[in-house]
Amino acid sequence: MQSKPTLVLMAGLPGAGKTTLAFALGSELGWPVLDKDRYKRFFLSRMTIVDELAAALAYEMAFELVYDILVQQRLSVIFDSSALRTFVMKQAREMVAAADAQLKVVLCSTGCDVRRSRVTQRTVSTGALSADIMAIENDIPLFTHLPADTLILRTAHPLAECIATALVYLHS
């Protein structure tokens, strides 16, 4: 009997290390990674639309792709999103229920100085970032809507250590 597919929902503020970890896990597991910010960049670069509309369109596109992979194809997938808004968690739960899949949430967390440094070193922009968001030192309270069994990773630790911890969690 085939095991249940898994939806891995990456969560965390900009610069927390979500995308780096998501692609490392995708490579390790052989699972596709859907990066919401990539779709947002696509909409921002190809259309003259405001940041909020590009983000909304990016989420819609990503949700459609996650649904196709998880529900239609019954394959595991990693969804790289901040998951800061409750609608992301609601949509993830609905797709997991429709696929009879399992949900694993990985919250990437680090201090504001590390996040700010990482964001300023990016070669491509994902749109406007709020100074208030970038100044938050303790980001965990922003994610109380995530499930109790969410893995919280301190991504200032070495990437290899974060990958190993995440793999143990994903296989549990």
Image (cartoon, grey):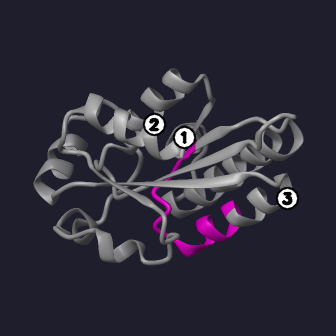
Amino acid on which the number 3 mark rests in the picture: Ala
Q: CB of mark 2 within 8 Å of CB of mark 3? A: no
* Vertical placement of residue 140 versus 23, above or below: below
In this rendering, position of residue 49 left or right of residue 132: right
Q: Depth-wise, is mark 2 or mark 3 nearer the camera?
A: 2
Measured as percent of width and height from the top left, residue 152 is found at 35, 57
For label 2, the residue is 167
> How far, Cα to Cα, is label 2 from label 3?
25 Å
Which quadrant of the view contains residue 124? top left
State the residue at coordinates (16%, 59%).
112
Sequence order check, earlier mark of 2 and 3 = 3
Viewer-proximal residue among 37 and 158: 158
Q: As drawn, which residue projects farthest toward the left? A: 113
Viewer-proximal residue among 12 and 126: 12
Q: Depth-wise, is mark 3 or mark 1 nearer the camera?
A: 1
Measured as percent of width and height from the top left, residue 166 is found at 41, 42
Amino acid on which the number 1 mark rests in the picture: His
Classify mark 3: helix, strand or loop: helix
> How far, Cα to Cα, is label 3 from label 1?
21 Å
Classify mark 2: helix, strand or loop: helix
Q: CB of mark 2 within 8 Å of CB of mark 1? A: yes
State the residue at coordinates (29%, 50%).
16
State the residue at coordinates (46%, 67%).
84
Measured as percent of width and height from the top left, residue 158 is found at 20, 33
For label 3, the residue is 98
Q: What's drawn in magenta, residue-wise?
A: 79-92
Q: Residues within 10 Å of mark 1 (few under 14, many from 20)?
A: few
Amino acid on which the number 2 mark rests in the picture: Leu
Can you say which quadrant of the picture contains the N terminus? Answer: top right
